[in-house]
Amino acid sequence: MRPENAVAYPAPSENPCKFTKNNPDCTTISRFVCYFFHKKGLLFRIFSKFVRFFECNKFTNISNTMVSYKDLGLVNTREMFAKAIKGGYAVPAFNFNNMEQLQAIVMAAAETKSPVILQVSKGARNYANQTLLRYMAEGAVEYAKELGWAKPQIVLHLDHGDSFELCKSCVDMGFSSVMIDGSALPYDENVALTKRVVEYAHQHDVTVEGELGVLAGVEDEVASEVSHYTKPEEVVDFVTKTGVDSLAISIGTSHGAYKFTPEQCTVDPKTGRLVPPPLAFDVLAAIEKELPGFPIVLHGSSSVPQEEVETINKYGGALKAAVGIPEEELRQAAKSAVCKINIDSDSRLAYTAGVRETLAQHPDYFDPRQYGKVARKYMTEMYSHKIIDVLGSDHKLINCD
C-alpha cells in the first residue's frame, strides 16, 4: 500500500508531453526538464549549422589555399641548372629530416656560397609534417640571410614522389621543385604520369624531375633488388613527351648505405676496404649525346665515408659492408651534364656518428642539445666537403653579391 503522506503524481495522459508550460500532465520538475531539453535541442541544431557553415567557409579555404614558393623566398631549379651545366659543376641536393640537418645544410651553403637543394622524401614529409616543412623552408631562407647570404638560392624539392596527388600537394604547399618517379612503371605509364605532373606544376612555375631507369638499394619507400640502366634511345622521346625540366638516370649508383654486395666489389689491398664497381660513364656519354645540354640528375650518390662507419661501429654500431660511390667518380660526373647530385646517407652517417660518439664519451648526457650540436657540426663539415671538394659548387651563386 502507498503511504498516506505520499505525493500523488497525476497519471500521464495518452499523449506525451508537448513542452508547453500549461500541459497538465507535467509536474513542475518534469515540465522544466522537458522545456530545458527542448530549448537545448534548438540551440544544438543552431550551433551545428553554424559549425558546418564555419568549416565549409573557413577551414576548407585555409587547407586549400595555394602557397607560392616565391612568397617563401625559394627558387626553382631552371636557372640554377643552366648555370651548372655551363660551369661544369653539380648543385648539391641534400635530404633532410630534422632541424639539425637543415641548420647544417644552410650553414655549409652560406659559408661556401653555394646554391643548394633541400630535398624531402615522402617519408621525411610524413615524419616532419608538411605544414612544419613549409615554415622550416621559409625559416631556412631567413636563416641564410642572417648568415650573410643576401639573396639565398635555395630550392625545396620533393624527392621520389610516387603519385600525382603527392606532387600536387607539395606544389600547393610551397615546394619549388618536385620529382615524379614512375621508373618502376611500364614506359607509357611513366610518360603519362610524368606529363600529368608537369602540366600541373608548370602552371605554378614549379620545375619537375622525371626518371628513367631503376636504381638498386633501399631508401625510405624506394626499394629495388636490381638496377636497370637508363636506355639512351628512350631519353629524347621521354623528355619530349613529358616536358620535364631534368632527368634522373641510372648508371650504377644505388640507394642507401649498402649500395653493393661484397661479391660485387673488389678489396683494396692497402686499406682492406671494399671498392665498388665503376659507374657506367659510357651510358652517361650516350645520354649526353642524345640530350646535349639537358640537365641530368644522379640519385643514390652518397660516398658512405668509412671514417663515419668506423666511428659508428666503434661506439656500438653494427654497419657491416657499408660502401658507397667513390668521390672521384662523382667529381667526374659533376663535370658533365650531371648538374644535380643527391646525397642522403652520408648525412645520416655523420649525424649518427656524432650522437653515438658523444653519448659513449659522456654517458651522463641526456639533453638532446649536448649531442645534437656535435652531430650538427659533423654534418656541416661533411656538407662543406661535398660542396667544395666533390661537386665544385662553391662560389657559384647566381648574381653573387
Image (cartoon, rainbow, N blue to C red):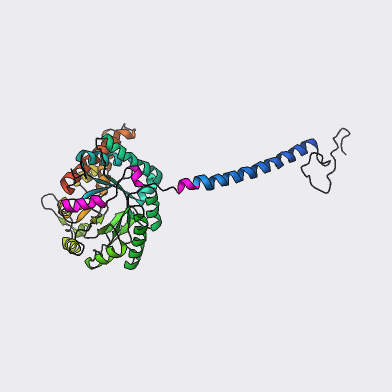
Taking the image as drawn, is residue 273 in sight? Answer: no
Q: Residue at x 77, y 36 (%)?
A: 29
Q: Main secondary structure of the magenta part?
A: helix
Residue 265 appears left or right of 73 = left
Residue furthest left in the image: 270
Q: Measuring from the top left, give residue 343's x and y in whole percent.
A: 25, 49
Front one among 344 and 116: 116
Q: Measuring from the top left, give residue 366's x and y in whole percent.
A: 34, 33
Q: Is residue 145 above or below residue 299?
A: above
Residue furthest top in the image: 364
The verdict on residue 63 being magenta is yes
The verdict on residue 73 being magenta is yes
> In which quadrant is the C terminus drawn?
top left
Residue 31 appears left or right of 228 = right
Q: Measuring from the top left, give residue 169's x and y in whole percent.
A: 40, 52
| Quadrant assignment, res 373 | top left
Q: Residue at x 57, y 47 (%)?
A: 52
Taking the image as drawn, is residue 379 in sight? Answer: yes
Q: Is residue 305 above or below residue 289?
A: above
Residue 308 appears left or right of 170 = left
Front one among 76 and 167: 76
Q: Is residue 86 above or below residue 282?
A: above
Q: Measuring from the top left, give residue 135's x and y in whole percent.
A: 37, 41
How many marks on residues? 0
Tell me where the magenta segment starts and ends, as one range.
Answer: 60-89
Front one among 303 and 275: 303
> In which quadrant is the N terminus drawn?
top right
